[in-house]
Image (cartoon, rainbow, N blue to C red):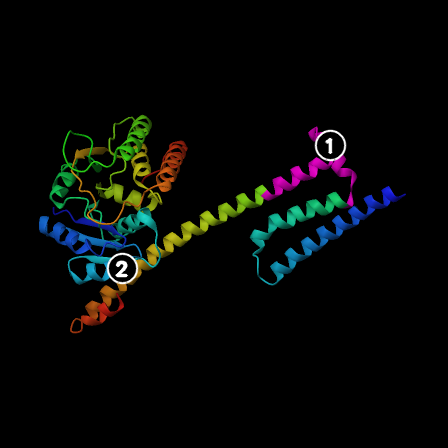
Amino acid sequence: MVMKILAIVPSFNEAESITHVIEAIKGENPLIDILVVNDCSNDETGALADSTGQASVVNLIGNLGIGGAVQTGFKYAVRKGYDIAFQFDGDGQHLASEIKILLDPILHNEADVVIGSRFCEKQNGFRSTPLRRRGIKVFEILNSLLIKQRITDNTSGFRAYCKKAIHFLAENYPDDYPEPEAVLLLGKNGFRLKEVPVCMQERKRGDSSITGIKSGYYMIKVLLAVLVNAMRPRIAKD
Amino acid sequence: MLKSLDINIIQYVSILGSVVFIGLIIMLIRNKRIKEEFAILWLFFGGVFLFLSVWRGSLEVIARILGIAYAPAAIFLILIIAIISILIHLSLITSRLTDQTKVMIQELGLLKMEMDTMKKKSRPDRPEDSHTEG
């Protein structure tokens, strides 16, 4: 049986990198379908992605933020019957050469959700700034306690999901800064999580969406979301 | 004499104020500027204040029940409860609207894409058309 695989590429003002990202994924594995979710960019991201002819493009009419954009991808994957979906950021920080590593545990039915982690093995590559690493450590401790499994990179957006997880997240994906919360949500609802070591590149262009005062807000918002989420009952799956 | 007159004046003013307030809210509902659902709390607290101004002794009774030594302070308590409940109600509504907007933006994006794909398929000889909208 051939698995239908979808790459979900959330992008907001990524005109400079989006074409390269699409070509990199296709170059790695031409059988992977690509969905670019253009989160109401102010630049040519959507048109450029469309002009490659190698990706489907959803142009959102309002800016939803990364959570809402990625969730659009899950909804698309559900409707088109994909078996596996993975998130691959439009800014070029994820490496196409590592898609295989990310998908393998799902293809071999060893996990339902695979997270590409910058921290689960000693390695080179971009591993964020010291202050951010400390923030990421907080999530590691908190989430690991809550779901009783060590997840080292809770903020990584380089993730792959099995069909069951796609269906679950199409209905339940968190909003603004979804990554750490999604780990808890998936872990708590019985999905098998696995981390694989990956490298990430520093953004060639543009800034992280989280800087300055926003980082403080980010920590507080996500901590609140994670803690409240831990108090919610499990969501019944069909 | 003068003192009792003062107290009467404030009672009239507060009755008038409550009636004008309730009237204003009803007018806004009537003109479809506020939906009934959102006006219920305003009307409820308007009613509470009308009740308090008509029956002045009620404030003393409430204060005694709650153990508030200075009865007029009870009115601030009630006022603060009113404002906070209405603000929480507004947060609930905003959150619901945010959720609904999100779903709408997502669905609209997916539908537009579906439509463009169908257009491209139905006119394969003129693929340029679909690009003009992007």
Q: Are marks 2 and 1 on the same chain?
A: no
Q: Do residues under tags 2 and 1 come within 8 Å of each other at their CB atoms?
A: no
Disc sitting over residue A43 in the figure? 2
Picture quarter with the C terminus of chain A: top left
User: Magenta span has B80?
Assistant: yes
User: Callout 2: helix, strand or loop?
Assistant: loop
Which stretch appears magenta? Answer: B54-83
Q: Chain of mark 2?
A: A
Residue on which the image places disc 1: B70
Q: Nearer the viewer, residue B1 or B120?
A: B1
Residue B80, relative to residue A138: is it above or below? below
| Three-letter amino acid code at the position of disc 1 | Tyr
Which secondary structure dominates the residues rendered in magenta?
helix
User: Magenta span has A14?
Assistant: no
**On the rendered structure, is B111 left or right of B21?**
left
- Where does the image place residue B77, in percent across and percent down from the top left? 65, 37
- Where does the image place residue A5, in percent across and percent down from the top left? 17, 48
Residue A69 in view of the camera: yes
Disc sitting over residue A178 in the figure? none
